[in-house]
Amino acid sequence: LAKTTQPISMDSYEGQEVNITCSHNNIATNDYITWYQQFPSQGPRFIIQGYKTKVTNEVASLFIPADRKSSTLSLPRVSLSDTAVYYCLVGDVEKGGGNKLTFGTGTQLKVEL
Amino acid sequence: SAVISQKPSRDICQRGTSLTIQCQVDSQVTMMFWYRQQPGQSLTLIATANQGSEATYESGFVIDKFPISRPNLTFSTLTVSNMSPEDSSIYLCSVPGLATNEQFFGPGTRLTVL
């Protein structure tokens, strides 16, 4: 599985847009890019996943450039409840990577008033 | 989505003893996963449990230390054997979702070993 690099922590204020970038220089052709969110004392929760270009759902947007060596998770108008650790993962279910999730260090997002 | 429960939610144990953690899913699933999350750290996969076969352990984890049972398609147990303070962690189970790389996680079991 490709190694991912993301900032250890980020701070923001309520109502702002937050963008968390993840680097994955060794991403393979079949790899998908997946983001999880983890609140304290809870298991991680799947947020969004993409292969290329842009993906948007009710929670976030995921931007993936053409070379796919990085990706950006965008959280619009964050609130205090978005304070959590966000993990970027890269893997491919066809190779078994999708079933064996490898979590990196994650980014601790702190949202303040 | 799958609803996953774990028992116990937390426990404090003495070194040298063993604890069995239960994971119950509200639907039948072929694969279940067990992870460990040490204090302030990320998650590490311990093993993959398939119903009807031996669990597959990741590097650094062995069956004697973390025996796993998978008696049916909705249930699994992980035992942490001969515990030491280094085993103090949160243990989580998960099951695959429909999307690639999607997994649903249980709430975790917080284990403290004295």
Image (spheres, coloured by chain):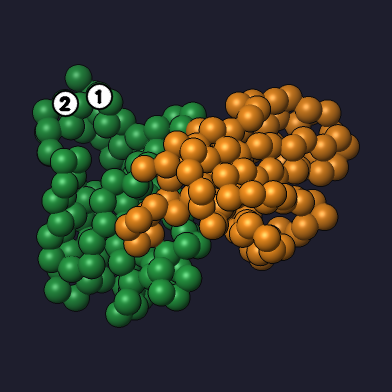
Distance from disc 1 to disc 2, alpha carbons, whole Å, reads: 6 Å
In the picture, measured across the screen, residue B34 lies left or right of residue A107, that is right
- The residue identified by callout 2 is A14
The verdict on a common chain for dots 1 and 2 is yes
Quadrant that contains the C terminus of chain A: top left
In the picture, measured across the screen, residue B54 lies left or right of residue A87, that is right
At 68% across and 60% down in the image, what residue appears? Answer: B52
**Residue B20 percent coordinates (x, y):** 74, 37
Q: Chain of mark 1?
A: A
Density class for disc 1 (Cα within 10 Å; few <14, some 14-19, many ≥20) is some
Which residue lies most toward the bottom here? A29
Which residue is at the front of the view, A19 or B25? Answer: B25
**Residue B32 percent coordinates (x, y):** 56, 52
How many discs mark residues in the rendered view?
A: 2
Density class for disc 2 (Cα within 10 Å; few <14, some 14-19, many ≥20) is some
Quadrant that contains the N terminus of chain A: bottom left
Q: Chain of mark 2?
A: A
What's the colour of chain A in the image?
Answer: green
- Name the amino acid type tagged 1: Leu
- The residue identified by callout 1 is A80
- Name the amino acid type tagged 2: Glu
- Contact between marks 1 and 2 (CB within 8 A): the answer is yes
Whether residue B12 is situated above or below residue B42 in the rendered picture: above
Question: What chain is colored orange?
Answer: B
Asked if residue A45 shows in the view, the reply is yes
In the picture, measured across the screen, residue B31 lies left or right of residue A92, that is right
Which residue is at the front of the view, B53 or A35? Answer: B53
Q: Secondary structure at mark 2?
A: loop
Q: Secondary structure at mark 1?
A: helix
**Residue B53 percent coordinates (x, y):** 69, 63
At 31% across and 52% down in the image, what residue appears? Answer: A35
In the picture, measured across the screen, residue A37 lies left or right of residue B88, that is left
